[in-house]
Image: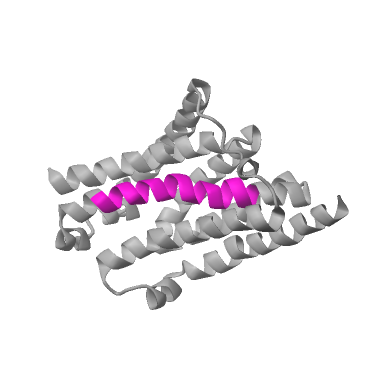
Amino acid sequence: MSIVNNRFRKTSYLGLFIVLVLTTIFWFPSVYKSVLSDDFEVRNYQMQCVDWLVVLMILCLIKFGERSKFKSLNIKKPTLEYLGIGLGLGGFSMLYILVHRIVLNQLGITTSFEQQIENPNLGLVGPEFVFTYGILSLITAGIAEEIIYRGYATERLMKLKGSYWIAFIVPLIAFVLMHYRTGIDHLFIVLAVGSLMQFYYLKFRNLTINIIGHLFIDLMAYTAILYKTFN
């Protein structure tokens, strides 16, 4: 038993180093822009692949390093109850985002969300890219990010440290810094919404709820972009 525990501990720390340190460093604009393609369309597809590569590494560490089962990520079979709780998470998050936008707009500040919708690069690549990339981005954000930061990082820290606040704060910091590339004001949204996601995960220990909530949030943003693009 001690050998298994020691293997789990060593493998988990390696995974946490990849997720919380290496991945965070990679997503700083000065780093990922020097690594990925200069082409706007190609780079955005590459960015999605990077997140899924991290997920693949996590799954390999769980299977061959920890020798645990994938159910340790706490992805549970969807139910109507989980759907309702997940939509509640998404609804509370959208309420904050709405208030955030209203306050900044009253101050005459253009939010990063609006900058994303008005991104001139979207006009250059055409509506086909917006449609196909948007779906991929929605799935990546809602599923891959939740696996990385909640199902893996938060869950492993909780098991290794047994501390609610370590498991809450450390993955949250990495999650916020990962979104640094989307703009400074967007970090306040990510901090608030990420904190809510951390709270929900540690309360229910059910990644399905987080995935539903995250998908709902990004679906609303994607719908706004589609409306702006095709209207």
Q: What range is drawn magenta here?
A: 132-154
Q: Residue at x 67, y 64 (%)?
A: 14
Q: Is residue 136 left or right of residue 62?
A: left
Instruction: Determine the image quadrant of residue 100.
Output: top left
User: Which SS does the magenta portion mostly show?
Assistant: helix
For residue 46, above or below residue 91: below
Q: Give the residue furthest to the right.
A: 2
Q: Is residue 212 left or right of residue 37?
A: right
Q: Residue at x 66, y 46 (%)?
A: 155
Q: Position of residue 83 (x, y in %)?
A: 47, 26
Q: Position of residue 213 (x, y in %)?
A: 46, 36
For residue 87, above or below residue 28: above
Residue 16 visible here:
yes
Looking at this view, is 58 or 199 the one in front?
58
Q: Residue at x 41, y 40 (%)?
A: 215
Looking at this view, is 78 or 4 the one in front?
4
Residue 99 visible here:
no
Looking at this view, is 107 or 171 the one in front?
171
